[in-house]
Amino acid sequence: MSNEVHHPPKDHFRILLEKIHEMLTETTEIREDCVFLPKWNMTIRPEIEQLEGRMAVLNFYVYMPEWDEPLFECCASTGNDSETAFGISITQFVFCFMNGVLAMLNDEEPEPLESEFAGKNHRWGVYTSNSIGLGESTPPESDDIWNMLRDHIVKRLGNQSVTYVKVYASKCIGKDDEQVIGEVRINDIPSRELSDMMAEVAKNWDVEQFASKKQFFFIKQDPETKLPNRYAGASGRAEFASKIKTSLDRFLSINTQEDYDDYQENLGSIIGDDTLAEEIIYFLPEAVAEDAFSEMKFAEDIRISIGGAEPVVVYKNQLTDYYPIVKIFFSMLGSNVFGEQTNEMYRMQVGNSSIYSCVEQMSENGVEDLSKCVMTSTTFNPSKKFEIR
């Protein structure tokens, strides 16, 4: 009979909360499953997605009432064991992501920036986080990265309160090959164009084995140029989600072309927002089809021809509602909100897209490898009631 003492497993989630609480320089409180920063009325809600082998994947949601959307960061790390990787992920979050967030909140030497969107001028301050590098020394410096991306980021700014840019690059030299990764995400949405640029940078690093670099740029809009968002705040987001649910319920009831014509014509008055109605009608099917045919490459911009006018080119990132609509849609699917009709909802959205029509045409023409296909910018033709926002 063994005399070995078996200790109960550590509560890693509690350790995660305590580590964030200890490592942040601001005054913090642990409140149930969150860390709260009273000075800023900010809540950090962490999640442990994976903790096994040599891998740790931690998710962090950062909330402030005045922000349009919560900020999100995923820290994935490897180490000699899961405990080491766990510690690295926490350190990355605190000393990189939260360093940038707090620099923004404390207004630490922002770089001024100006942009134009939908005929309106917007002013911003740019705040740079610490960079986290693993492995060998990883040039270029932060200023070089920002200067390379700056003009491309400006073109993707809309009317959000805060836009945050994640930059990650790595290069690993194997026995017979090398692996290069470049990643740029804007409000946690990957940009293929900018990621390719970062990959080219990492490709030229002088590395013997491995090097990586991660950094954030937080871009806060001047309150004087921020236009109102009717769906801001917790109550606004709840109303936004409710209107999307109402719209999707109506969409599921479509059986004939007459039903669809009625859906298009009357949805705006039903939910009390003509623009949101047309965004759901036109944008959502294309976004769902992008998910269905994810091996393809899609343009990051779209063209909007309001009432038949000359098309206006905008990036999807710029639109206040585009990605929040998509996020809520997939959240509803994941929560099985539509019950037995969940798969039907997904199928109907995909089938209602222009992307699906293009894929069908390519299939008829003998195209089998969709990964080699690049979709150009889609043109949408909403009514004169539509506002670009």
Image (spheres, grey):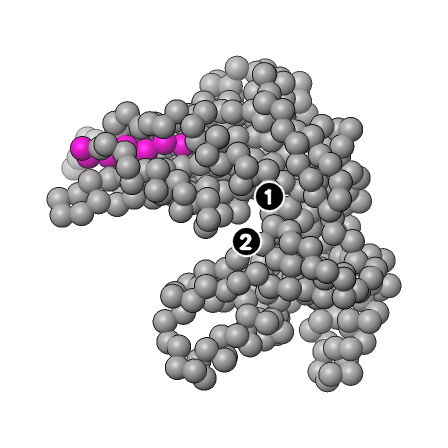
Question: Is residue 109 highlighted in magenta?
Answer: no
Q: Is residue 274 left or right of residue 134?
A: right
Q: Is residue 107 left or right of residue 17?
A: right
Q: Give the residue at x 39% y 77%.
A: 367
Local secondary structure at mark 1: loop
* Mark 2 vs 1, N-terminal side: 1
CB contact under 8 Å: marks 2 and 1: yes
In terms of depth relative to the viewer, which is nearer, 347 or 296?
296
Local secondary structure at mark 2: loop
**Given the current orientation, which residue lies at the most extreme front position?**
310
Magenta segment boundaries in residue numbering: 208-214
Q: Quadrant of residue 6?
A: top left
Q: Give the residue at x 69% y 47%.
A: 320
In terms of depth relative to the viewer, which is nearer, 193 or 27?
193
Q: Position of residue 119 (x, y in %)?
A: 75, 44
Check the image and report above or below for 71 versus 95.
below
Check the image and report above or below for 258 versus 42.
below
| Residue position marked by numbered label 2 in the rendering | 300
| Residue position marked by numbered label 1 in the rendering | 156
Q: Residues within 10 Å of mark 2 (few under 14, many from 20)?
A: some
Total marks drawn?
2
Q: From this viewpoint, is residue 314 visible?
A: yes
